[in-house]
Amino acid sequence: MDSDDKRRSRINMIAHLLSTERETGKPVAQVAKDLGINEGTLGNWVNKDIAAQAKSGNGGLSESERAELTRLRRENAELAMERDDAPMFVKSRRLSSRRAAARR
């Protein structure tokens, strides 16, 4: 096996590991343990893959996803402001009702 074959074989193996990590949805540490490889090594490969996808545009958000993200961030900011501007008795009442519920 010459060096090009070894390189192709290694690239194919890494691609398979990355697809396994993506498809399972498990944390990198769990996938690495399941596959019997070092967690740091798999983590490095995943990070490089994510960076490569972002650079190529394949890993980015679609226009509709980007619009939804913007809308959700705006909504989240508005809700945070409403929460922070709520009168103190409302906040304390909310906290006391949560504590009471937790005791049950």
Image (spheres, grey):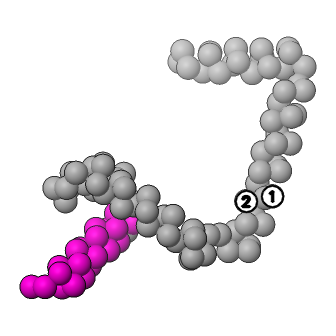
Q: What are the residue bounds of the magenta stretch?
A: 1-22
Badge 2 local density, few (<14 within 10 Å), some, or many (20+)? few
Q: Amino acid at mark 1?
A: Arg
Q: Is residue 56 magenta?
A: no
Instruction: From this view, report whether residue 82 is shown above or below residue 74.
Output: above
The answer to whether residue 22 shows anywhere in this view is yes
Image spot of residue 16 (x, y percent): 28, 74
Task: Please say whether residue 16 is visible from this viewpoint.
Answer: no
Q: Nearer the viewer, residue 51 or 1?
A: 1
Left or right for 37, reference 19: left
Q: Is residue 80 left or right of residue 97?
A: right
Q: Are marks 1 and 2 in contact (CB under 8 Å)?
A: yes
> In which quadrant of the rendered view does residue 32 lie?
bottom left
Taking 73 as reference, is 63 above or below it?
below
Instruction: Name the residue at 80% across, 19% down.
Output: 91
Image location of residue 49, percent across then percent down:
44, 67
**Front-lying residue, 73 or 85:** 73
Q: How packed is label 1: few (under 14 Cα within 10 Å), some, or many (20 or more)?
A: few
User: Could you tell me which residue is drawn at 82 percent across and 49 percent down?
Assistant: 75
Which label was assigned to residue 15? none
* Element carrying mark 2: helix
* Residue 85 located left or right of residue 69: right
Residue found at x 28% / y 70%: 14
Residue type pointed to by label 2: Leu
- Magenta span: predominant SS is helix
- Quadrant of the image containing the N terminus: bottom left
Spatial distance from mark 1 to mark 2, Cα to Cα?
5 Å
Label 1's element?
A: helix
Q: Residue at x 58, y 71 (%)?
A: 55
Q: Which residue is mark 1?
A: 71
In this figure, which residue is indicated by the disc labeled 2? 69
Find the residue positioned furthest to the front.
3
